[in-house]
Each structure stands twice: as structure tokens, then as C-alpha cells.
Image: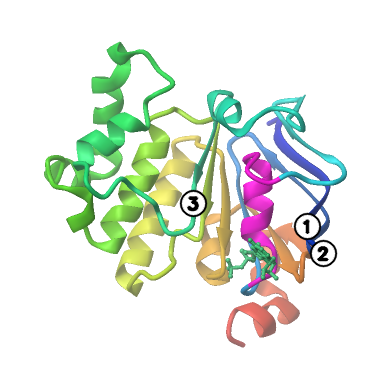
Amino acid sequence: MGVILSAEELNVYYGSIHAVKDVSFEVNEGEVVTLIGANGAGKSTTLNTIAGLLRSRTGCVRFMGEDLSHVPSHKIVAKGMALVPEGRRVFLQMSVQENLEMGAYTKSSGGIPADLEMVFEQFPRLKERRRQVAGTLSGGEQQMLAMGRALMSHPKLLMLDEPSMGLAPILVEQIFDIIQSLHKAGTTILLVEQNAQMALSVADRGYVLETGKVVTTGPSAELLASPAIKKAYLGG
Ligand code: ATP
């Protein structure tokens, strides 16, 4: 299992605010890795830096061995990285199927029907609702749609920013079941979550961020068992 992504000594600023401080981590092919931490810990900033939407002042992001420092974000997608941003951001006026087809923009049209079937297999709910306008979907369904749209580009790395946000517990379970099954199917996933319990239950390894810094890292089982992590992130 080789390293597919490495973040090396990232330092990201918003003006004078130092939001991400010397953050380094790796994701191996086929792994689910989670970045957990409280509000404002720098999780989204880190993810957006990986995707090229923000730039680090130091270090670099290496994807499949290539330094992405000077690669624009639209080219990063074509290299096989897909980001499902916080808040889903599906195209509300378009149907479910049209949204999914938008995700396939890097591919020739010949493959789209097969890709749609692949996504519908993962998300049967979307198949039932393929002609429904996305704006009328529930929050959980919109999250599924955003994930399905990302999968349409066959990403080598799928990045999910807080997929559980704003969802009822039952939907959170469903979303994490799907993450689990994508993991089993071999998808490499970088998952950002405030819901540490759920994130660590599906991830192989985790990194804990506090005020912009990685403070702990380890296999998920180890983090779940750690008294300090339990106290700070798992409600006891
Ligand atoms: P959340 O779970 O609340 O999204 P997070 O861990 O993803 O938290 P970030 O959104 O990465 O945290 O924010 C890290 C820090 O950077 C915070 O202190 C935040 O206030 C600050 N920050 C984020 N975006 C901006 C911005 N556009 N301008 C200025 N500061 C920002």
C-alpha cells in the first residue's frame, strides 16, 4: 500500500490569522484517514489547502508523488482528487441525474451511463429520485448526491468535509455506512469530522487537530481507547 497523499509542513494563513500550523500527515492507498477536532481547529482549512483552494506558505502537498504547489485547483481534480465541501453545494435547480452528470465532466460521455449505475448501486435512494430537483431533497439525500457526484469522476482520493453536519442521527448512520462500504470497495478517503466517534469508527487512522496543530495521531482503535481523546472528543 503506497502513500497517495502527503501533506508536508503546511502553514496556512487568513491575513494575520495563522489557521494551520506545521501540519503534516499521510494517506495510503485504500485507507480511510480522518482529521478530527473541534470547531475552528483548522480541519476545513487543511482540506481546502489539499484541494488547492488555499495555498500553504511553506512545505507542500504531494499527490501520487507530484508536488501540487503550483498546480491550479481545476487541474488537481483532473489528477484524481475530489472534494465534497462542507454544506454539500449541489446544484439546487438541477435534477439528481443532472447533478451526477456534472460530476463526470472530466470524462468522455461514453462512460456516463455505467458511472451512473455504479453511483445508483451505492445510493439506491438517488436512483428512485433521479428526476427530482435537488433543492427538494432532504439534507441527507443532498449529502448522498454530493458524494455520488464526486464519485462520478472516479477519484483516486475522495475528500469529505463534515458529511454528518446538520443531519439527524439516523442519516448520520446511513452516511457512515456508505463511507464504510466505499472503504470496502477500495476507495481512498480523507474524512474531516467533528463527530469523532463516528469518524474513528470507519477510519483506519486519525489525526487530532487543536488550534491548527496536529496534537495526536494513531490507529483509530488506539485513539478511541485513549482517555485523553475520550475526555476531549468522545463525551467522556
Ligand atoms: P469547523 O468545524 O467549525 O469548520 P474547522 O476545524 O474546519 O472548524 P477552519 O474552518 O479550518 O476550522 O478554521 C480554522 C481557523 O481559521 C478558525 O480560527 C477560523 O475562524 C479561521 N478562518 C476560517 N476561514 C477563515 C476566513 N475565510 N477568514 C478568516 N479566518 C478564517
The mark lying in front, picked from 3 and 2, is 2
Q: Are marks 1 and 3 in contact (CB under 8 Å)?
A: no
The residue pinned by badge 2 equals 16
Q: Is mark 3 within 8 Å of ligand 1?
A: no
User: First in sequence: mark 1 or mark 3?
Assistant: 1
Looking at the rendered structure, the kind of residue marked 2 is: Ser
Residue 85's mark? 3
Identify the secondary structure beneath mark 3: loop
Q: Residue at x 78, y 57 (%)?
A: 13
- Residue placed most toward the observer, 47 or 172: 47
Is 122 on the left or on the right of 218, as rendered?
left
Q: Are marks 1 and 2 in contact (CB under 8 Å)?
A: yes
Picture quadrant of residue 157: top right
Q: Is mark 2 within 8 Å of ligand 1?
A: no
Is 173 on the left or on the right of 46, as rendered?
left
Is 78 on the left or on the right of 108, as rendered?
right
The residue pinned by badge 1 equals 13
The mark lying in front, picked from 1 and 2, is 2
Q: Which residues are magenta?
A: 40-54
Q: Identify the image quadrant of the C terminus.
A: bottom right
Q: Are marks 3 and 2 in contact (CB under 8 Å)?
A: no
2 in relation to 178, above or below: above
* Label 2 Cα neighbours within 10 Å, binned few <14 / some 14-19 / many ≥20: few
Magenta stretch: residue 84 in it?
A: no
171 in relation to 33, above or below: below
Rendered-image quarter of ligand 1: bottom right
The mark lying in front, picked from 1 and 3, is 1
Looking at the rendered structure, the kind of residue marked 1 is: Tyr
The answer for how far apart the CA atoms under marks 3 and 2 are is 24 Å
